[in-house]
Amino acid sequence: MTDKRLVLWDIDHTLVDFAELGSAWYATAFTAATGAPLRVLPVFGGRTELATTTELLTANGFEPAEETIQTLFKALVAESERAMHRFPAEARALPGAAEALAAFAAHGGVVQTLVTGNLPEISRHKLAAFDLLEHLDLEIGGYGTLSVHRPDLVPHAVALAAAKHGTTFDPGAVVVIGDTPNDVRAAREHGAVSVAVATGRFPAEELQAAGAHTVLPDLADPDALHRAVLG
């Protein structure tokens, strides 16, 4: 048993809101990777980048070969890098995000990282635009390159965190914070605590039905978030 707690944050619609900015990168990245125009648009909703890219290639008539997937990943990172200067004007940090990260960092027993469908590089770009990197250890996160199955990201991050900190994080000491039913299922599949925020496309009722232990309207109430994460 340990008194430490591992908090695994989602990014999009949980900490930041990029609206449809990321979707716009796919047309250019897809053409760069395949030489063809993008006809079928990607589907997100808490899915991993590997799942999105695999299905996107298939839907547009291409074999999701590893080389093509990696080329598309690199093209997406390049699009993100080109757009970074626009992030402060076209995207936003969600209310309470910076304060929540700082509050948990001040609690000596909390380790914070990411479980996100994003690519590692794009995760950094999105968070850096709003000074949200300071309290997150990105080296021990679970990212969208790992698996098409979102729940696989949780044990990966837990294992990395346990190895780095030389401790065991029991399932009940792991908290997944996200805005989609996929985030909720990723937590519940591994016995972790699910804290859902209704700041994305999914209403509180749907997040509750998915099995979230706690559903909050947003991150703006520090006391409610503290109770949900730390008890």
Image (cartoon, rainbow, N blue to C red):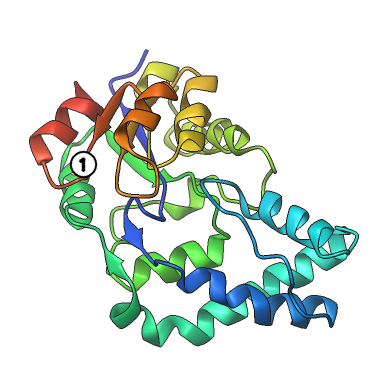
Read off the residue under disc 1: 104
Amino acid tagged 1: Phe
Q: Nearer the viewer, residue 29 or 127?
A: 29
How far across and down, in percent of the image, does residue 180 sit? 44, 40
Quarter that holds the C terminus: top left
Residue 54 lies in quadrant: bottom right
Within 10 Å of disc 1 (Cα), the crowding (few <14, some 14-19, many 20+) is many
- Quadrant that contains the N terminus: top left
Relative side of 98 to 207, left or right: left
Locate residue 26, reporting x and y percent.
64, 73
Q: Is residue 142 above or below residue 181?
A: below
Snapshot quadrant of residue 208: top left
Q: Disc count in the image?
A: 1
Q: Position of residue 189 (x, y in %)?
A: 54, 21
Residue at screen point 50% across, 49% down: 116
Say if 52 sits above or below 198 in the image: below
* Quarter location, residue 159: top right
Residue at point 53%, 34% (across, down):
154
Q: Against 54, is 18 above or below?
A: below
Q: Nearer the viewer, residue 142 or 56?
A: 56
